[in-house]
Amino acid sequence: MVVRLGSVTSTQDEARGLPVGAVVVAEEQTAGRGRLDRRWEAPPGSALLATFVVEPNALASIAAGVAAAEACGPAVQLKWPNDLLIGGLKAGGILVEGHAGRQLIGIGVNLSWAPPGAARVTGIGRDALLDRLLTELPAWLARPAEEVVQRWRERSDTLGRRVRVELPGGVREGLAEEISDDGALIVDGVAVRVGDVVHLHGG
């Protein structure tokens, strides 16, 4: 069930009362948000703005990142945990929230417009990208964890870089060495499961 709406506060908000399998797509979000309560803004019709209602999955964030990258094309790489990058610039992002025994996977991708310092995915329209996601997301959510994590590694723009991780209790800098089987980022031997990653120049 795909619910198409015009202007909404957030596709996440609209999806909260819907069953597993539902998808909400909007022309515009007036209060769209990303991770860490950041604002997600885009002119009407310029981006794919969608929320998918799915069964709980421990690797939902990683699997959604892989699915979105696969749908967007080979130029897209992943920044932990699930930002979509083109040439090191953000072209999209994913927000996973739990609600009433379900997970809401919000995906936003810049298509015909991008803010300063960001990128956009070209060569595909919103409906075509949505169609790809309707195939890729369920497929990657259903795959074994090791396959999901391995594909994330192959798409990664984070591994092998020096990074700064902004944690709830402070900051850690080091080498992003690996991603664990449960999706944690290993920075200088320490597993990071929650935090915001900044790629440092020269790393």
Image (cartoon, rainbow, N blue to C red):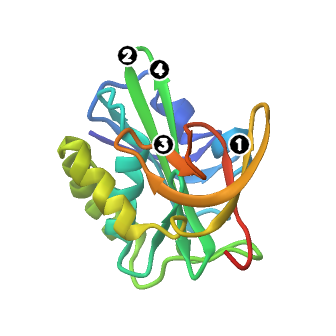
**Distance CA(mark 3)–CA(mark 4):** 22 Å
Query: Residue visible at 57% across and 59% down?
Result: 176
Q: In front: mark 3 or mark 1?
A: 3
Tag 4, which secondary structure?
A: strand
Marked residue nearer the N-terminal end (2 or 1): 1
Image position of 141 (left or right of 117): left
Residue at the farthest top position: 100
**Distance CA(mark 4)–CA(mark 1):** 19 Å
**Distance CA(mark 2)–CA(mark 1):** 24 Å
Circle 1: residue type = Ala
Circle 4: residue type = His
Q: In front: mark 4 or mark 1?
A: 4
Circle 3: residue type = Ala
> What x and y, as percent, mark residue 41?
70, 57
Q: In front: mark 2 or mark 3?
A: 3
Query: Residue visible at 56% across and 31% down?
Result: 13
Asked whether the residues under the numbered discs 4 and 1 touch, taking CB atoms below 8 Å apart as contact, a structural biologist would say no
Asked whether the residues under the numbered discs 4 and 2 touch, taking CB atoms below 8 Å apart as contact, a structural biologist would say yes
State the mark number for residue 101: 2
State the mark number for residue 99: 4
- 54 or 152: nearer the viewer: 152
